[in-house]
Amino acid sequence: MNYLEKRILEDGIVKPGNVLKVDSFLNHQIDPMVMEEVVNEFLNYFGDRKITKVITIEASGIAPAIMLAAKLKVPMLFAKKTEPSTLKNENRYESEVHSYTKGVTSNVIISKEYLDETDSVLIIDDFLANGQAALGLADIVQQSGAEVAGIGICIEKSFQKGHELIKEAGLDLFSICRIKSLEDGEVQFMEE
Ligand code: G4P
């Protein structure tokens, strides 16, 4: 069992609707020890890839993404969910991301200034549920002509569709924790 899995069992709270609350160490208060362990896991898996940029989506993806980017010594770029007033339409890539959890669709945006065909990009996020955020980011990377080096996720809810959709898209996915079930208020991980 890895460190993040242990923390989920100790400090995670299962909420109704198959939601795992990890506000005490990942989604609100952020424990740097957890971040260090998360970064080590990502480095073990992706460390030998050519990566020129780490990208994520605001807000909760930013912490693991910046910590990893610092180790890789590359920039971290985050997609914005709200219309930036300083970024004109022709200067941006955008992709529609539907959140099944929140029931809203948002346009996620990245400036053309920071992503192009010379980049090899690692996509990082805190949660993978239905995969819409990760696939939206992959779409933006592909629009820019850059390569998706892989997708790294802290907590995957393997009983939702995201894992399957990302694999079907032919993308290399690594999730530090894979949750098989949150039924009856209990966290169960996939067996290795
Ligand atoms: P998807 O991107 O994989 O399709 O996820 P989905 O639409 O189902 O989830 C929408 C938001 O809810 C995402 O955050 C996602 O990370 C988060 N989420 C999904 N399931 C859980 C869960 O069980 N626990 C927690 N804590 N979060 C979950 P977001 O809207 O982008 O929020 P944020 O990054 O601004 O925090």
Image (cartoon, rainbow, N blue to C red):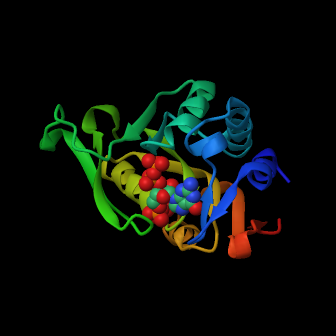
Please state which of residues 60 and 116 is positioned toward the viewer in this rendering.
Answer: 60
Q: Quadrant of residue 185?
A: bottom right
Residue 31 placement (x, y as % from top left): 67, 34
- Counting labels gives 0
Q: Left or right? Give the position of 110 relative to 191.
A: left
Up-down: is 117 above or below 153?
A: above
Question: Where is the N terminus found, in terms of image quarters?
Answer: bottom right
Up-down: is 59 above or below 139?
A: above
Up-down: is 94 above or below 186?
A: above
Please state which of residues 58 and 152 is positioned toward the viewer in this rendering.
Answer: 58
Residue 71 placement (x, y as % from top left): 63, 26
Question: Where is the C terminus found, in terms of image quarters?
Answer: bottom right
Q: Quadrant of residue 13?
A: bottom right
Residue located 46% across and 43% down the image: 56
Residue located 56% across and 68% down the image: 167
Residue located 70% across and 65% down the image: 179
Q: Which residue, as the protein is rendered here, is positioned at the far right?
A: 1
Residue 128 showing in the rendered view: no
Please state which of residues 75 and 158 is positioned toward the viewer in this rendering.
Answer: 158
Q: Left or right? Give the position of 133 relative to 95.
A: right
Residue 147 placement (x, y as % from top left): 45, 48
Q: Left or right? Give the position of 117 relative to 71.
A: left
Residue 4 placement (x, y as % from top left): 75, 47
Residue 111 showing in the rendered view: yes
Please state which of residues 172 and 60 is positioned toward the viewer in this rendering.
Answer: 60
